[in-house]
Amino acid sequence: MGTRPCERRAVRLAAGALFAVQTTFIAAAGVTAVPAGGPVPAPGAPVSAAAPGVPMRLAAPASRPRRVRPVWLGHTQAARRVQRAGLGLYSSGGCTDRRMRHCTSLEAIRTRTLRGAIRLKRRSGCPVTLTGGTEVGHVVGRYSHGNGYKLDVAPNACVDRHITRTQPFRGLRSDGALLYGSPESLYARTPSHWDILFR
């Protein structure tokens, strides 16, 4: 059976109304019309100006620099890295409690600080033993033991020779310790140990 002319016209009118409604929704969503075959930008995306008849291109989003945040390690995690790198870890009290001054703790040590100590061993070829970490009993301050920036290293002839020969002499610290290195990697020779800052 064929359709009557009135029915065909009603179908065409309904299809036209539906197309008009779809076009209205697309315009309300903020989509910019482009010539046939051109790319359709996403709703709300920035577009660059283009000559008539030329498809518009989406503007590249501005890249934001990534923030690099320092990472602090727990004692167990840091001690594993120390052991794998062949460094020694000594505590006069035989403990790792950060709240006890006679312990040697690596709790909340910065990864950068630990890498500095490992680098010292690799470059010097010397035995390196950590005798002080983040435990209480050290001088406080921003770049301090407690904040994970400093480590104490036991002196020996090999370590002493490597530091004094490879690091420039910087004078005396306020407590009389001999200073070598730079503000980013500063080695202070106290009577009992090397007090080393790794920024």
Image (tube, grey):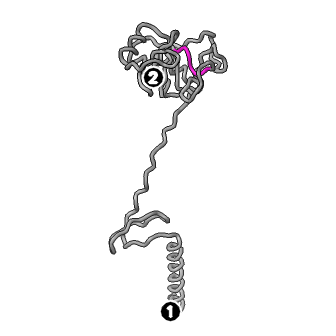
Q: Is residue 102 magenta?
A: no
Label 2 secondary element: strand
Q: List the single residue furthest toward the right.
A: 99
Left or right of residue 141: residue 125 = left
Q: Is residue 134 magenta?
A: yes
Q: Give the class, few, some or many, for how many residues have Cα within 10 Å of label 2's Cα (few <14, many ≥20).
A: many
The residue identified by callout 1 is 5
Question: Bounds of the magenta span?
Answer: 130-135
Kind of residue sitting beneath label 1: Pro
Indicate whether 22 appears above or below 134. below
C-beta proximity under 8 Å, tags 1 and 2: no
> Which residue is drawn at the image coordinates 47% and 69% (left, top)?
31
Query: Which label is found at residue 164?
Result: none
Name the residue nearer the viewer: 25 or 174: 174
Measuring 51% from the left and 9% from the top, which residue is drawn there? 191
Quote the CA–CA distance across marks 1 and 2: 94 Å
Q: Decide if residue 123 is on the left or right side of residue 3.
A: left
x, y percentage for residue 94? 62, 10
Furthest residue to the bottom? 5
User: In the image, what residue type sits under mark 2?
Assistant: Leu
Q: Earlier in the sequence, mark 1 or mark 2?
A: 1
Above or below, 94 against 22 in this view is above
Q: Secondary structure at mark 1?
A: helix
Asked where in the image residue 181 lies, by quadrant, the reply is top left
Answer yes or no: is residue 183 visible: yes
Q: Is residue 51 left or right of residue 105?
A: left
Which labelled disc corresponds to residue 186? 2
